[in-house]
Amino acid sequence: MFYKHFAALRLVRSMLRLLLLPAIFLALLLMACSSLAQGQSHPTYEVYALSYGVYPDFPVSALLAGADKTRKIDLQMMIWLIKGPGGKNILVDTGCYHENVVKGKGIKDLIKASDAVAKLGLSAADITDVIITHMHWDHADGMDLFPNAKIWIQKDEYGYYTGAAWQAGGKSGGIEPDDVLTLVRLNMAHKVMMVEGDDREIIDGIKVYTVGRHTFASQYVSVRTASGTVVIASDNMYLYENLEKHAPIAQTFDADSNLKAQDRMKQIATRPDLIVPGHDPAVFVKFPKPGNGVARIQ
């Protein structure tokens, strides 16, 4: 009788082992997948606004549709640095510095974009990528300062300003011919990356969007950060006031499209204050640290 009970017990134990093996295997598999997922987690970035000068007594009516024509502002000239893991340093726009471009404009405290990034301990050679939001002189003139960078620009922006903009009926206001020639040379050197259209993730965690229509195919940028999604509007939204008053920018190919872009920015950004306008001095008031012409957006 004892042997019968012992044999039955052994049989039960064997059956339990067989039942437990799939559960143990599943648990091990889930642990392995979790470790793999952690190893492949998506990167987050730090976003900084960098001052490169101030344009004094600038008319607000050139920024905000319908604004009082007598109102003036000390226009903040800025670019943006996106710092990522693994030495990824992405610059959004490149400011201006060539004498023929800045001469007579009276910009105060003007520095090169390469000197602006030095405030965060970076050299021009450390910049891996440059995103050009649009081809105006104060955003694209410094493209030639960053020898190791890939240049990201909308394909339609490139095509228009290297072609139709200079034909009869074209619009080339604010575009410097020398900057266009620089862009063409960079393209011939295989450094230009053409972005085709809206809502494109060009780098993991960094997307570009069109329809702001500040220029023919201007783009704005969203960035994944530890604080949430930041939107670098550039000149698709000059001032916080554009957003607050739901007023289009004063210089645009299409005011309705510009307002739609601003509405969309509010959907993309985690918080409204994480939408960074292109020229508002209040950026450095809202985000005063670390200072010295540098504002961390968080």
Image (spheres, rainbow, N blue to C red):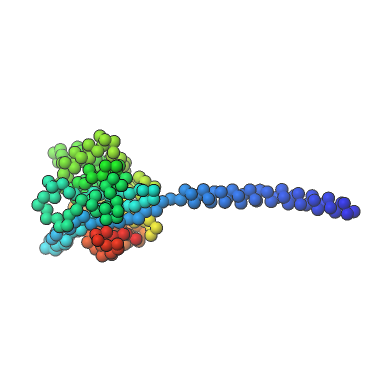
Residue depicted at 59% across the width and 48% down the height? 29
Q: Is residue 68 left or right of residue 152?
A: left
Of residues 166 and 190, the one drawn nearer to the viewer in this rendering: 190
Evaluate whether residue 18 shows in this view: yes
Evaluate whether residue 242 shows in this view: no
The quadrant of the rendering that contains the C terminus is bottom left
Of residues 153 and 86, the one drawn nearer to the viewer in this rendering: 86
Q: Is residue 8 left or right of residue 262?
A: right
Residue depicted at 87% across the width and 51% down the height? 4
- Which residue is outermost to the left? 104
- Which residue is outermost to the right? 1
Q: Position of residue 240 (x, y in %)?
A: 25, 61
Residue depicted at 38% across the width and 60% down the height? 227
Of residues 5 and 89, the one drawn nearer to the viewer in this rendering: 89
Picture quadrant where residue 190 is located: top left
Residue depicted at 83% across the width and 50% down the height? 7
Q: Position of residue 210 (x, y in %)?
A: 29, 48
Q: Position of residue 112 (x, y in %)?
A: 20, 51
Q: Position of residue 278 (x, y in %)?
A: 24, 55
Count of marks overlaid on the render: 0
